[in-house]
Image: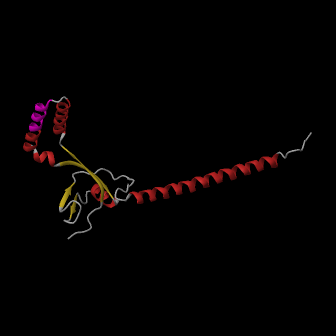
């Protein structure tokens, strides 16, 4: 059994559900207007639509995946492998994701969504501390350059000496 399935950091799917969303807007309008009979009619039309078009409604049309490692996205783009197989112990269960087309891999800043609040605070504190150290270094460099420029001015034009 394969256990090295690609590590997906985040995945979002799009569906052909514009019709359902429009019907839900109608239902919301009916509920806001306290027209419960119209809301029930819209609900029944939503149920009928889903029953007739179930496969189209539940089948994703696109998937936006952020992989933990760029290797998988490069493989998808190159066309070497347009399928990702997942084992039963994967987060998706046993299944295969098939991709018709993959966009260019891009650099994605990974956001740790699995860490606890304490871990996130510690990471944030470390980042702030690093930024403070770097900023302090820049400040010290600017002070040093200012002192050297003052000394150079003093050497060129010493105080208290009148050349006339």
Q: How is the image coloured?
A: secondary structure
Q: Nearer the viewer, residue 99 or 125?
A: 125
Q: Residue at x 7, y 44 (%)?
A: 51
Q: Pick the quarter of the image with the C terminus.
A: top right
| In the image: residue 108, left or right of residue 4 | right
Examine the residues drawn in magenta and state their main secondary structure.
helix
Residue extent of the magenta highlight? 35-45
Q: Residue at x 18, y 59 (%)?
A: 96
The magenta stretch spans residue 68: no
Q: Pick the quarter of the image with the N terminus.
A: bottom left
Labels in figure, total: 0
Q: Is residue 104 above or below residue 122?
A: above
Q: Nearer the viewer, residue 111 or 96?
A: 111
Position in image of residue 19 (x %, y %) = 16, 37
| In the image: residue 159, left or right of residue 76 | right
| In the image: residue 147, left or right of residue 137 | right
Position in image of residue 48 (x %, y %) = 7, 40
- Determine the image quadrant of residue 93: bottom left
Q: Residue at x 12, y 38 (%)?
A: 43
């Amino acid at each position: 059994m394969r256990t090295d399935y690609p590590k997906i950091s985040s995945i979002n799917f799009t569906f052909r559900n514009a019709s359902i969303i429009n019907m839900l807007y109608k239902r919301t309008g009916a509920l806001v207007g306290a027209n419960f009979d119209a809301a029930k009619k819209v609900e029944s039309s939503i149920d009928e639509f889903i029953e007739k078009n179930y496969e189209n409604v539940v089948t994703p049309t696109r998937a936006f995946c952020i992989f933990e490692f760029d290797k998988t996205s490069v493989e998808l783009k190159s066309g070497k492998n347009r399928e990702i197989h997942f084992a039963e112990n994967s987060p998706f269960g046993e299944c295969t994701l098939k991709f018709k087309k993959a966009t260019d891999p891009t650099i994605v800043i990974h956001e740790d969504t699995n860490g606890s609040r304490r871990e996130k605070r510690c990471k944030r504190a470390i980042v702030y501390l690093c930024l403070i150290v770097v900023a302090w270094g820049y400040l010290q460099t600017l002070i040093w350059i200012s002192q050297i420029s003052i000394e150079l001015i003093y050497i060129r034009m010493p105080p208290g000496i009148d050349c006339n």
